[in-house]
């Protein structure tokens, strides 16, 4: 699939997933989920959804996401025009925590 088209689909998925988590999801644990990125395979069969969550146990959130994946996929399919909606695979995005640790280390070094 064309790289630009796939990137557009990734962005559309990310935007719609954040709207779904903000407005459609009733589960209070999942209300705090923020999608930070989406990576769909070239054959559109799988979409890796990177997320972060605030003030929640990530293992519990991941469990809830897996249980709600069918509903979430159905909502995305209603909102994004695509022939086949990929299966959603949720993965915690550790890049924000990694950046925070680096920032803390830099501050620590400056204070010495």
Image: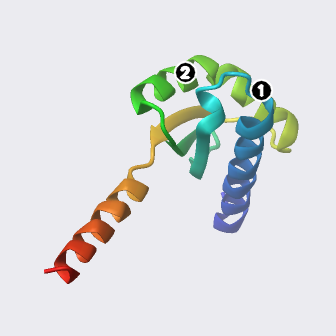
Q: Bin the neighbour count of mark 2 within 10 Å (Cα to Cα): few under 14, some 14-19, many 20 and up.
A: some
Position of residue 32 measured from the top left corner of the image (x, y, whole percent): 61, 37
Residue wearing tag 1 = 74
User: Residue 22's spot in the image, x, y percent?
Assistant: 74, 39
Q: CA distance from mark 1 to mark 2?
A: 16 Å
Image: 38 above or below 4: above
Q: Residues within 10 Å of mark 1 (few under 14, many from 20)?
A: few
Q: Which mark is residue 64?
A: 2
Locate residue 43 relative to residue 19 in the image: left or right.
Answer: left
The residue lying furthest to the left in this view is 112
Q: Nearer the viewer, residue 16 or 23?
A: 23
Q: Is residue 58 left or right of residue 70?
A: left
Tell me where residue 92 sits by quadrant. top left
Q: Residue drawn at (66%, 57%), measured in percent from left and top?
A: 1
Task: Name the spot of residue 65 as percent of width and height, x first.
Answer: 56, 26
Residue ID at (82%, 44%) = 80
Between discs 1 and 2, the one toward the N terminus: 2
- Residue at image location 71% in from the left, 42% down from the top: 17
Asked if residue 47 is positioned above or below residue 14 in the image, the reply reads above
Residue 46 seen in the figure = no
Asked if one can make out residue 31 in the rendered structure from this viewpoint, the answer is yes
Q: Are marks 1 and 2 in contact (CB under 8 Å)?
A: no
Q: Residue at x 42, y 30 (%)?
A: 57
Q: Quadrant of residue 104?
A: bottom left
Residue at the front extreme? 111
């Amino acid at each position: 699939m064309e790289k630009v088209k796939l990137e557009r689909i990734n962005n559309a998925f990310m935007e719609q997933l954040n709207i779904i988590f903000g407005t459609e999801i009733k589960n209070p644990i999942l209300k705090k989920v923020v999608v930070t990125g989406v990576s769909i395979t070239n054959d559109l069969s799988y979409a890796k959804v990177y997320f972060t969550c605030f003030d929640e146990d990530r293992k519990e959130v991941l469990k809830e996401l897996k249980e709600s994946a069918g509903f979430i996929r159905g909502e995305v399919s209603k909102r994004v025009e695509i022939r086949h909606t990929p299966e959603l695979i949720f993965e915690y995005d550790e890049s924000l925590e990694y950046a925070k640790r680096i920032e803390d280390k830099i501050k620590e070094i400056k204070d010495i």
